[in-house]
Image (cartoon, helix red, strand yellow):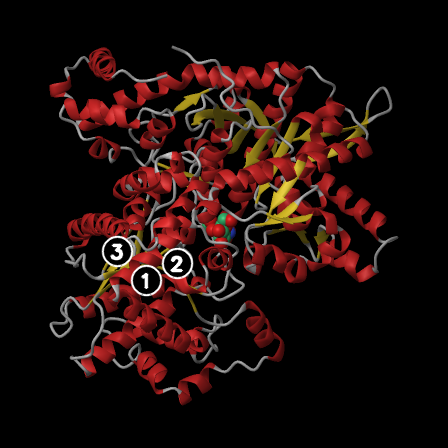
Amino acid sequence: MALDKEIFKEELKQRLRENYAMELEDASEQEIFYTLGALVKARYSDAWRDTWKYYVDKNKKQVYYFSIEFLPGRMLKSNLLNLGILDTAREALTDLGIHLDDLAEVEKDMALGNGGLGRLASCFMDSIASGGFPGNGNGIRYDYGLFKQRFVDGYQVELPDEWLQSGNIWEVRRESKAVDVRVGGHVYLAETNDGKLKPVYENERVLRAVPYDTGMVGYENNVVNTLRLWAVEIPDSEEDKYQSIQGRRELEDLTAVLYPDDSNEQGRLIRLTQEYFFVSAGIQSIIRHYKKWFQKPISKLSEYVSIHINDTHPALCVPEMMRILIDEEELSWEQAWDITVKVMSYTNHTIMAEALEKWSIDLMQRTLPRMYQIMEEIDARYVQTMQELHPHDLVERTRIIRNGQVHMAHLSIIGSHSTNGVAKLHSDLLKSVVLHDFYIIYPDRFNNKTNGIAQRRWSQIVNEPMSNVLDETIGKTWRQDSGDLKLLRNYQSDQAVLEKLAEAKKINKQKLADYILGTTDIEVSADAIFDVQIKRLHAYKRQLLNLLHIIKLYQDLKENPSLEMQKRVFIFGAKAAPSYHYAKVIIKCINETANLINNDPDIKDRIKIVFLPNYNVSLAEKIIPAADVSEQISLASKEASGTSNMKLMLNGAITLATLDGANVEIRDAVGDDNIYIFGLTEKEVYEYYENQEYSAQRLYDENAVIRRVLNAFIDGTIPNIVYEGREIFDSLIKYNDEYFLLRDFDSYVEAQEEIDKAYGDQTFWQKMSLINIANAGRFSSDETVSRYAEDIWKIESKDSFVTEKG
Ligand code: GL9
């Protein structure tokens, strides 16, 4: 429905009067933002109801995407865009003397995730709705999102993220849809009058799960799906058990905080309870909805419901579904198992061993006794079935419960019909190495689904200057279908187009430079190469390799001030998990090196280092459009996919990468000439693991450049890192450089030198940049989600089915 600008203005004013008893002139930005949010929400509420009703009336099969993290960031502009009223709203606001972009800054980031995994879940929510697919998210409504990061004396300091403080305009509390979740206590099986075995619960705690729903607005198609997030409350029946404030606190803490990954032991009980809490609440509400609205027998569930397990955190979906089907719906084990496996599918997001989730039997039994009983039975039946088909040790290695632990990845694979990796290389590694045993047992269950990004957000919303050039050059169809970006290929030698794209980039760089000055007091030149590494801080992602190269450049310049090189601004954005000591040490070292170099009068603006604090989705939106170089330098085989690589490419940054994760597919998309590849391949990395010949000490002894760079950490060159510098040095030399930084160092430096040269030839550079934009279309999450829908979830798209409302 088109938006009439004048009516919009009147409505905004009217709502302000109603809600705040105020005229526009007297309202604060905050008040206007909340009013605008309510107005936008009202515009899609009919479509939200109609969408839901359509799925029910037509008995549409739906997918439920279970994820312990969702990272939507800000939603105002993306809702406006998807409703087709972004431009009109912007103009209307301008008429009223308000800048939409300023207003958008009022919205707190919804940061209910750590990184790529949570952001992917949100990109999928956008694409599922935009593709007209019946699909909903299911997760946790944390009171506090991922911590706010500050730097104090170069150290990371974590502050609580109070995103709900001023309320959340987009959510709807649905008290009538609350369900109970039982945890703790004891469960034993007792015979009922009709001779059936039924679980009896003793001393369990009952938690009330209350859903908060947020509309997921599809792109110009009148589809609005639901993201359902659960919050814990104390049920009335249990009030007397929680008379002490402390007791209440403990319970209410359950959905208080998002767990940073790599978190400590002490919080693990809460984490496991969180996992069960949102899984149980979600599945109960799915079954309730199915029975009430579909009125089909429970035995047909898999024809109407698909549940996706996003990484192993929701793996308890498998035993919880079994519990409901057996204990409550009274199906036989065999029937229940058949349905469960058909309903469930699972994505693996990492090969990092420490991230493959396991729980001790003891903790599992104490926290979730009924779940444990069911998993024991699944495990026993698995062993029994498989030992007739496969060697004993293979079956032992793949069972769910072994060596005192419950293996959540094993549970997810055994309990579902599909296991996928998130990039070709990653999926291949799952089959050949990480999950090879399971591949022997279930070859047909394995498949690849390369990640994608919400392209409309990461181009149209964040990069207007570039979007305008695209419109002028190839028309506007790319806005709907990012595949049409390839039309840009025809202009790779068109000087005028190249220059217009360069101008757009320059505008974005200047804007970021202003932001950098405002937040860090560091002055950077928009003429410099903006070299960007933005992602969680992790040893395998090798932010440290980036730093080693910067130190080398610094030392070169100090030694030879007349050295010719392009000006560079190295931009970092990264949070370290609060308990991840080594990652925090790296942050400190980057910050101290930045201090040293940024203030060295010999260097001036030839190198600048900017570590922007509090990296999150909305900061990414500021950095990505301004990037020239995209650092994707993880040790080959370690990054499952990466998604910032795709966002940066779409915005015309040139990728500097190892052949890891989706970088491989980016290389295939743009060709060798439009990307800078360096370093060991995944095969070479595995060879080192096999022959154990890697010696960092030898590289240090034999390579004078490496020696000089590493010595800077311990000889006082970089000030204020007496302990941290030693720790870095030791990690590389004494502990033999786990991620082969030194082995890849020379090749990285060489690639950086090529980039330096290439940037000197602006036409050449701009052409590469254009080719990157032109070939980014294939990394759209619209495409990825279509593949999931077709191959895994078996759900159908239905575009624009809700009647146009005039
Ligand atoms: C991750 C991988 O590390 C990334 O390479 C991948 O792109 C994303 C999405 O598939 O998943 N796996 C993972 O555990 N995280 C990822 O980012 N971690 C977090 O999000 C905290």
Q: Which residue is rendered at x = 41% and y = 89% of the image? A: 702
Residue 250 seen in this snapshot: no
Q: Which mark is residue 587?
A: 1
Which amino acid is tagged 2? Leu
> Closer to the observer: label 2 or label 3?
2
Contact (Cβ within 8 Å) of mark 3 with mark 1: yes
Quadrant housing residue 15 = top left
Query: Crowdedness of circle 1 by 10 Å Cα count: few (<14), some, many (20+)?
Result: many
In screen coordinates, is 10 left or right of 633?
left
Q: Residues within 10 Å of mark 2 (few under 14, many from 20)?
A: many
Q: Which residue is mark 2?
A: 537
**Marks 2 and 3 close (CB-CB < 8 Å):** no
The residues tagged by marks 2 and 1 sit, at their Cα atoms, a distance apart of 8 Å
Q: Earlier in the sequence, mark 3 or mark 1?
A: 3
Is 681 located above or below residue 616 in the figure? below
Tag shown at residue 702: none
Say if 443 sits above or below 789 in the image: below
Residue 687 screen position, x and y as percent: 60, 75
Pointer 2 with pointer 1, Cβ within 8 A: yes
Q: Nearer the viewer, residue 190 or 149?
A: 149
- Say few, some or many: other residues with alpha carbon within 10 Å of mark 3 (under 14 / 14 to 19 / 20 or more): some
Q: Nearer the viewer, residue 350 or 525?
A: 525
Q: Quadrant of the N terminus?
A: top left
From this view, report whether residue 463 is shown above or below residue 721. Answer: above
Q: Which residue is mark 3?
A: 151
Residue type at tag 1:
Ile
Q: Position of residue 284 (x, y in %)?
A: 62, 26
* Residue 156, horizontal then vertical, whole percent: 30, 56
Under mark 3, the amino acid is Phe
Inter-mark Cα distance, 2 to 3: 14 Å
